Image: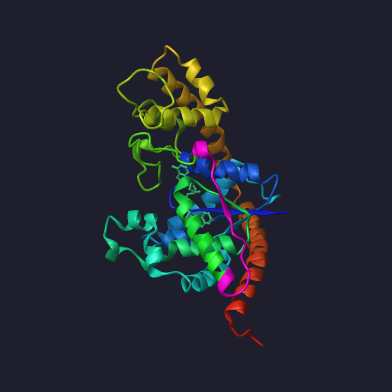
Amino acid sequence: RPRVLSGIQPTADSFHLGNFLGALRQWVTLQDEFETFFFVADLHSITMPHDPKLLRERTLVSVAQLLAAGVDPERATIFVQSQVPAHTQAAWVLECLTGFGEARRMTQFKDKSAKGGEGAASVGLFTYPILQAADILLYRPQYVPVGEDQRQHLELTRDLAQRFNSRFKKTFRLPEPYIMASTAKIYDLQLVEKQMSKSIGGSGCIWLLDDPAVSAKKVRSAVTDSETEVRFDPVEKPGVSNLLNIHSALSGTDIDELVAAYAGRGYGDLKADVAQVVVDFVTPFRNRVHELLDDRSELEAILSAGAERATEVAQATLRDVYDRVGFLPRA
Ligand code: TYM
């Protein structure tokens, strides 16, 4: 069966609605048709200063959230990135194939290092996309379900795969990004031109594990525009269009149908309904996560089996990689 792989960082106490609609939801649906590998990218979470105790806790809470979202350990391989050493080993080889300028062009590095200046950023933040390429290529997946912000990293991944294949021998499969157009980029509810993100957080970000009443309030305070008509127009009406997108994705109602239903009604009605749809989603999600966290040994057992299976696959690819670059095998 063709494969699908994706990862998510455990950088906050909770995933947000953008993570769920942009990526996680697709992970769940792809399980039916593909052999799937999903992991918590803890190695990626130490590229910025972090608290070790929090990281450990968030890693486990992340796993609980994957399960609550519907990732099924019976069908998917669920693992923690740092438990599969082949990722960092392959990353080194790929780093040696990456141009300095090529890595510097990554917009996420530019954004994330913008605050303290490039000099304050870690080298890990700089090489982060190459580790991501290793994460992906080791599993030879056909699709990588992600949000729009990861597209550039996927392009680098394909470039590196192609370069390795042509310089040595065909080893990697060129993966394709799997990006759902309608939810590729969920926007911040306050800064409507920015994508909802863990780093901005605040009142424009819906955290899946927040008190649902808090999330409802954030939706009701979402920034819209000075008109009154509910219309889908992402350029002229980014706030309203984002709300329509969120509603549509969570309720399964077409945008056109929603727009028709709000004819002659104001933004207040739209916000109240989106708030309700969000509450209806996060309430059971959050309860399920808390239930799952009651039995941590169960989560650990899933991860242990996952690491074993992932290692099997990744290690086999790494063996090819090492062989093809000319490393002497241990006798
Ligand atoms: P991360 O943890 O930032 O985000 C996880 C997933 O959520 C998507 N996403 C969004 N989608 C729509 N709207 C938004 N506002 C939004 N915010 C986030 C992201 O695109 C992502 O799919 N580098 C990755 C983790 C990673 C990875 C990998 C992914 C590491 N190795 C290998 C795929 C394959 C990251 O930081 O995602």
Q: Nearer the viewer, residue 291 or 21?
A: 21
Q: Residue at x 40, y 27 (%)?
A: 240
**Magenta-colored stretch includes residue 174:** yes
Rendered location of residue 177, percent (x, y)? 55, 50
Q: Quarter-wise, where is residue 192 in the image?
A: top left
Residue 291 visible in this rendered orientation of the protein: no
Q: Quarter-wise, where is residue 204 in the image?
A: top left
The image's colour scheme reads rainbow
Instruction: Answer with left or right where residue 317 lies relative to residue 93.
Output: right
Q: Please identify the residue farthest to the top as the structure is shown.
A: 264
Image vertical order of residue 166 relative to residue 31, above or below: below
Rendered location of residue 159, percent (x, y)? 51, 62
Q: Nearer the viewer, residue 77 or 31?
A: 31
Image vertical order of residue 181 relative to residue 58, above or below: above
Q: Quarter-wise, where is residue 329 in the image?
A: bottom right
Rendered location of residue 194, percent (x, y)? 36, 41
Residue 150 visible in this rendered orientation of the protein: yes
Q: Which residues are magenta?
A: 165-183
Q: Nearer the viewer, residue 287 or 69?
A: 69
Q: Residue at x 54, y 72 (%)?
A: 89
Instruction: Answer with left or right where residue 63 lies relative to residue 120.
Output: right
Instruction: Answer with left or right where residue 160 lies relative to residue 220.
Output: right
**Magenta-colored stretch includes residue 221:** no
Q: Residue at x 52, y 22 (%)?
A: 256
Rendered location of residue 30, percent (x, y)? 65, 45
Q: Quadrant of the C terminus?
A: bottom right
